[in-house]
Image (tube, rainbow, N blue to C red):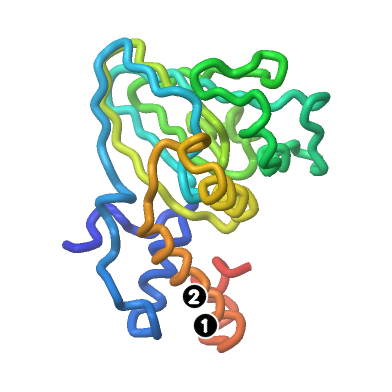
Amino acid sequence: MPHAGMQPGALGLETTAWNATVGLPYCDEQPMPVNEFRWGLAATAGALHFLHIDCEGLGTFIDVKCGEKIFFVPRPNILSHPSPSRDGHDTFGNLELFLEDYSPENPVRSLWSVEAILLSAGSRMCAIPTMCLLLRLTPNRILRPNTPHAVFTPSNSICHGGHFYSKSTIRDTFYGIVHTFIVGKVATNATHHSSRVFIRRILQFYKKGLVDQAYQNSSKRFLLLL
């Protein structure tokens, strides 16, 4: 099946948007880029991935199948990089964050406060907006789009994972797209040009639902637009 592994989920918007825009202008130019959005990782003990954000403003989920992963998630110190929002996540929208004394291999400690998150077999890390609440109530671990993180593998591990776009973190997605465009590999470690296809189809999905009013108010697709 061409879309195997890309079933619509509770967080992601891209698959529903893709299915809803089949046949619309500029939406059938290429197949769904499944291989870039669903993948597997195998790493031996001691593997280290330096600080980075996931490219193109993508949300990411990781399912640990065996072994362990440690995610190091820094947050800018409020005094050095004040945030205009209550939750503090807008701090990562500051472009100077990746220009002033920023080093993926050796972050300046005065600029960051670092949290370590251990994932073992059966754990998942994903990107959703209500981080602190869900850390207490579910086994999921949280990583928003545009969040710098480093990853260490303490024991041999195998993981399944993928990328997605979510309306609830679309502001973080915008920040991540701008960072990727302006500073490139200084902030990120990959490029996924096919993500533009999903963004175009998400925009078409919103236009179809909100402007053309193609969905009933009680339908699942309409509710995704809200």
Q: Residues within 10 Å of mark 2 (few under 14, many from 20)?
A: many
From the viewer's perspective, is 109 left or right of 50? right
Camera-nearest residue between 129 and 81: 81
Identify which amino acid the numbered label 1 is placed on: Lys
Q: Quadrant of residue 201?
A: bottom left
Q: Position of residue 109 (x, y in %)?
A: 66, 14
Q: Residue at x 32, y 16 (%)?
A: 47
* Disc 1 to disc 2: CB gap under 8 Å: yes
Residue 220 seen in render: no
Query: Which residue was labeled with disc 2?
Result: 205
Judge left or right: residue 131 versus residue 160: right
Residue 129 shows in the view = yes
Q: Position of residue 174 (x, y in %)?
A: 60, 54
Cα gap from disc 1 to disc 2, whole angstroms: 5 Å
Left or right of 25? Residue 130 is: right
Element class at badge 1:
helix
Location of mark 1 (residue):
208
